[in-house]
Image (spheres, rainbow, N blue to C red):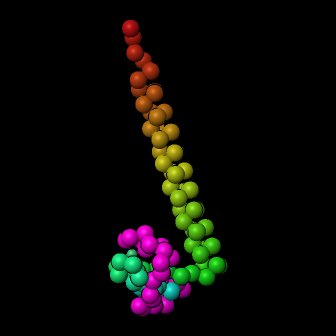
């Protein structure tokens, strides 16, 4: 596990671990710099479901943004189409 503070891969101690909502949250302490950070541990199935949900949400968001842009673009073109020299 790479330390997010110093980038060391020397290792870390788990100083606390909590099981909440299907994921295990661990507090870690870097062997190199002594800073603390947290990690989450999921089962394969939970992680897969979580990723699928994230990807679906992101896809819907970008589709909605695309529709919004298209709609606005059409309105703009319509109003600015009549422009004499
Ligand atoms: Zn560190």
The quarter holding residue 83 reads: top left
Q: Nearer the viewer, residue 10 or 82?
A: 10
Point out the stretch of residues depicted in magenta.
1-23
Query: At 42% across and 18% down in the image, what residue appears?
Result: 82
Query: At 41% across and 23% down in the image, what residue appears?
Result: 80
In the visual, does 51 lie left or right of 40?
right
Q: Nearer the viewer, residue 19 or 59?
A: 19
Numbered label tally = 0
Query: At 59% across and 75% down in the image, what residue appears?
Result: 47
**Which quarter of the rendered picture does the C terminus lie within?**
top left
Query: At 48% across and 33% down in the image, what residue appears?
Result: 74
How far across and how far down the image is residue 12, in percent?
A: 45, 83
Residue 37 visible, this orientation: no
The quarter holding residue 75 reads: top left
Q: Nearer the viewer, residue 3 or 43?
A: 3
Task: Please determine whether, in this image, residue 83 is positioned above or below residue 74.
Answer: above
Residue 43 visible, this orientation: yes
How far across and how far down the image is residue 71, in percent?
A: 48, 39
How far across and how far down the image is residue 3, in percent?
A: 43, 74
Q: Given the current orientation, which residue lies at the most extreme right position?
A: 45
Ligand 1 shown in quarter = bottom left
How far across and how far down the image is residue 36, in percent?
A: 36, 81
Q: Magenta includes 10?
A: yes
Q: Nearer the viewer, residue 54 or 32?
A: 32
Q: Magenta includes 8?
A: yes
Q: Given the current orientation, which residue lies at the most extreme top position?
A: 85
């Amino acid at each position: 596990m790479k330390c997010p503070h110093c980038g060391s891969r020397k290792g870390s101690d788990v100083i606390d671990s909590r099981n909440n909502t299907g994921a295990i949250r661990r507090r870690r302490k870097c062997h190199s710099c002594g800073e603390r950070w947290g990690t989450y541990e999921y089962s394969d199935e939970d992680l897969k479901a979580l990723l699928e949900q994230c990807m679906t949400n992101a896809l819907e968001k970008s589709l909605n943004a695309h529709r919004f842009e298209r709609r606005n673009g059409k309105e703009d073109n319509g109003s600015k189409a009549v422009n004499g020299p």
